[in-house]
Image (cartoon, grey):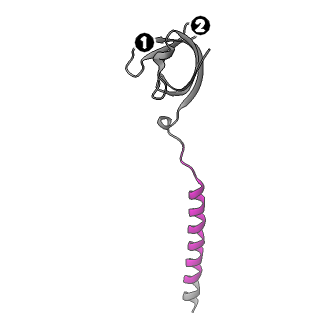
Amino acid sequence: MKAFITGLVIVIVLGVAGFMGFRYLSRQTPPASDSSQSLTATLTGTLMAGKGDDYSFVLRDAKGKTTGVTSQTIQLDKYANKKVEVTGSYSGTTLYVYTLIEQ
C-alpha cells in the first residue's frame, strides 16, 4: 500500500510539473529573425530613372542622397523627373513603393 501511494504521488507531481512546463513554454514567442523584418519609410524627393540589380528608379532627396526604388503596384515611369512623396518597405537597400503622392 505504501508503494502504491508513493507511486501515485510521484505520478501526480510529474503530471503537474509537466503541465506547468508546457504552459510556460507555450507562452514563449521565438525572437523575430532579421530576415523577416522589414523597415517602412516615407521619403520625399525627385524620382529619376536609374538602373540597379533590383530597382529601376532612384529618388534624390533635397540633400542629394539617392535611394533605389521600385514598385510592383505603381507605374513609376509616369512620375519620372517629378517631386514625389513615396512610402514603402525596404528590402536590402531598395525601397519597394506601395504609395506615391505627387508634390
Task: Report the residue at 53% width, 41% height from top.
Answer: 32
State if disc 2 and disc 1 touch (CB < 8 Å). no
- Marked residue nearer the N-terminal end (1 or 2): 1
- Circle on res. 63: 2
- What amino acid type is highlighted by mark number 2? Lys
| Eye-nearest disc, 1 or 2 | 1
- What amino acid type is highlighted by mark number 1? Gly
Q: Which of 87 and 82 is in front in this view?
A: 82
- Circle on res. 50: 1
Magenta span: chief secondary structure: helix
Count of labels in the image: 2
User: Which quadrant of the view contains residue 63?
Assistant: top right
Residue 49 visible: yes
Q: In this view, does 101 lie to the left or right of 79?
A: right
3D distance between C-alphas at marks 1 and 2: 18 Å
Percent from the top left, x then y, of residue 33?
A: 50, 39
**Which residue is situated farthest in the bottom direction here?**
1
In the rendered view of the protein, which quadrant contains the C terminus?
A: top right
Q: What element carries label 2?
A: loop
Q: Is residue 76 left or right of residue 45?
A: left
- Circle on res. 19: none
User: Which quadrant of the view contains residue 61?
Assistant: top right
Residue 38 position (above or below residue 75)? below
Q: Residues in magenta?
A: 7-31
Question: Around disc 2, counting alpha carbons within 10 Å, would you say few (fewer than 14), some (14 to 19), or many (20 or more)?
Answer: few
Percent from the top left, x then y, of residue 75?
A: 47, 22
Residue 30 position (above or below residue 50)? below
Percent from the top left, x then y, of residue 88?
A: 54, 27
Whether residue 58 is in magenta: the answer is no
Q: Nearer the viewer, residue 5 or 52?
A: 52
Task: Report the residue at 53% width, 32% height from top.
Answer: 38
